[in-house]
Amino acid sequence: MTLMSEIDRYLRATRMAETKFGRLAANDPRLVRDLRNGREAGRRMRTRIAAFIAGSLPQ
């Protein structure tokens, strides 16, 4: 699964706004929009996003 598809799935499941996700996951409200427009997330950013998603989903 790609990073963007994981983010999209999380956003749908939580009904969270893209800007809020970016602020909470990476302190960057433009993160999701930038990723959609071609920004490449580095290894550290991918790890940070994955940790945020894993840590905030109900078990």
Image: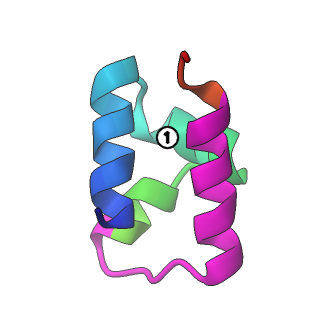
x and y, in percent, of residue 9 in the image: 29, 39
x and y, in percent, of residue 57 in the image: 54, 25
Q: Nearer the viewer, residue 26 or 13?
A: 13
Please say if 16 is above or below 49.
above
Picture residue at 60% right of the left edge, 83% below the top: 42
x and y, in percent, of residue 18 in the image: 41, 40
Membership of 35 in magenta stretch: no
| Mark 1 crowd level (few <14, some 14–19, many ≥20, 10 Å Cα) | some
SS state under label 1 = helix
Membership of 47 in magenta stretch: yes
The magenta segment is 36-55
x and y, in percent, of residue 20 in the image: 55, 33
Q: Nearer the viewer, residue 58 or 9?
A: 58
> Quadrant location of the N terminus?
bottom left
> Quadrant location of the C terminus?
top right
Q: Is residue 28 visible?
A: no
Picture residue at 69% right of the left edge, 58% below the top: 48
Please say if 9 is above or below 26.
above
- In the picture of the structure, the residue carrying the numbered disc 1 is 19
